Image: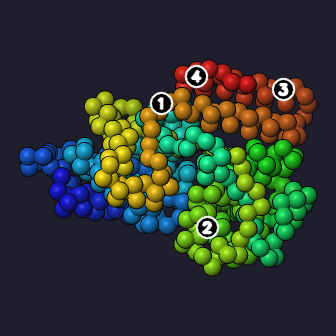
Amino acid sequence: MTHADRRRCLAAALALAAGVRPAPAAAARPGGEREDGPALVFGLLPMGDAVEARRRWEPLLLTVAAALKRPVTVFSAFQYETLDRALQAGRIDFALLSGKMALDAVTRGPMQVMAQVRRRRDPRLVEHRALLLARTAGGPANLDAVLRAPQRWHIARGDRRSVSGFIVPQSELFLPHGIDIESAFKAETVGNHQDNALAVANGDADVATSNSTDFERFRALFPAEAARLQVLWTSLPTPPAQMLVRRALPAGLQAVLRDVFLDYGRAPGAETDRIVLRSLQTELGFEPADDRALLEAARMQRDLALRRAQVAQWVNESARRGRIDRVEREYRAQVQQLGGPLRD
């Protein structure tokens, strides 16, 4: 595929993301013979500006298009629900997802895991952690001020499917202190990490959930606003994101796609590719994985549901026990489907 062909592939991708029907783009074989084939669709959930997110992904997606000899288009969704519907409808061919979003796409949808983001083996060196942010002036002075009186504060949080924007803060921080992130605060705003951080910096909210990766990017994009923020809480390392592929894709196509991600940035002279990986906050690239990589996400969902069952108000003990039993049954079914052992 020539450079011009790659650019046409990307133009088609951007047109599709903007709601414009792109003209068919043909991919080239190495000998110059052209091969028409349906475009593959990459699902993207930007954590900030959609155009900037697509720009960061462009070089890697062009490499995918060249390897597959067919165009790659981008389905850019601004809400979890939009991307989830597209996944369940089989409109997405591959996507980088994490947590409940990835779990649902595999256990209830048409996707399977083919790789995951490589992390450092020493947990002390893992940068990706959930955060709770506040203003340096005019908001809660410390974490204790939030936990003692959540009803005083306006929280900006992520969607319920967001690992660092909801699941981890709820399970590791708030529920252990008897606080339900969805009902205990004075007010709440639900958005992406960038918008939530801006809301706190500009005084529209008092605290916000985020993660260390997106906050690092936020500092680079909005240095003045970032200077007005402080980190009140940092979680344990969060699980890596998984690269999912639609099961119905031909096995040969899946194998090529998987190899592109596993090999990207590994060659001795591939410094340009490694710069791309750093811009995507996947500095170490990707490593092999299968559906068992989602066992930790299933466990996190089980633990979160059990904690909520413990703190919720029930009409009687039998109702509470029934909810706990359903959670455990669902967890066992997920573990069996993912091919892993049960974990307490």
Q: Nearer the viewer, mark 2 or mark 1?
A: 1
Q: Residue 290: which disc?
A: 1
Q: Pinpoint residue 306: horizontal percent, then vertical percent.
A: 78, 34
Q: Residue 83: which disc?
A: none
Q: Quadrant of the C terminus?
A: top right
Residue topped by disc 2? 195
Mark 2 or mark 4, which is nearer the start of the sequence? 2
Q: Pinpoint residue 180: horizontal percent, then vertical percent.
A: 81, 49
Observer-nearest of 178 and 18: 178
- Are discs 4 and 1 less than 8 Å apart at CB? no
Mark 4 or mark 3, which is nearer the start of the sequence? 3
- Are discs 3 and 2 less than 8 Å apart at CB? no
Tell me the element at label 1.
Answer: loop
Classify 10 Å Cα crowding around label 3: few (below 14), some (14-19), many (20 and above): some
Q: Nearer the viewer, mark 3 or mark 1?
A: 1
Mark 1 or mark 4, which is nearer the start of the sequence? 1
What separation in Å lies between label 4 and label 1 (alpha carbons)?
11 Å
Mark 1 or mark 2, which is nearer the start of the sequence? 2
Confirm whether residue 155 shows in the render: no
Q: Pinpoint residue 303: horizontal percent, then vertical percent.
A: 74, 35
Residue at the far front in the pictured view: 268
Q: Nearer the viewer, mark 3 or mark 4?
A: 4
Q: Residue at x 34, y 62 (%)?
A: 14
Observer-nearest of 87 and 133: 133
Amino acid type, residue under disc 1 in the picture: Asp
Query: Left or right: 114 with respect to 21?
Result: right
Q: Residue at x 55, y 65 (%)?
A: 217
Q: Residue at x 63, y 79 (%)?
A: 224
Figure label count: 4
The answer to whether residue 2 is above or below residue 311 is below
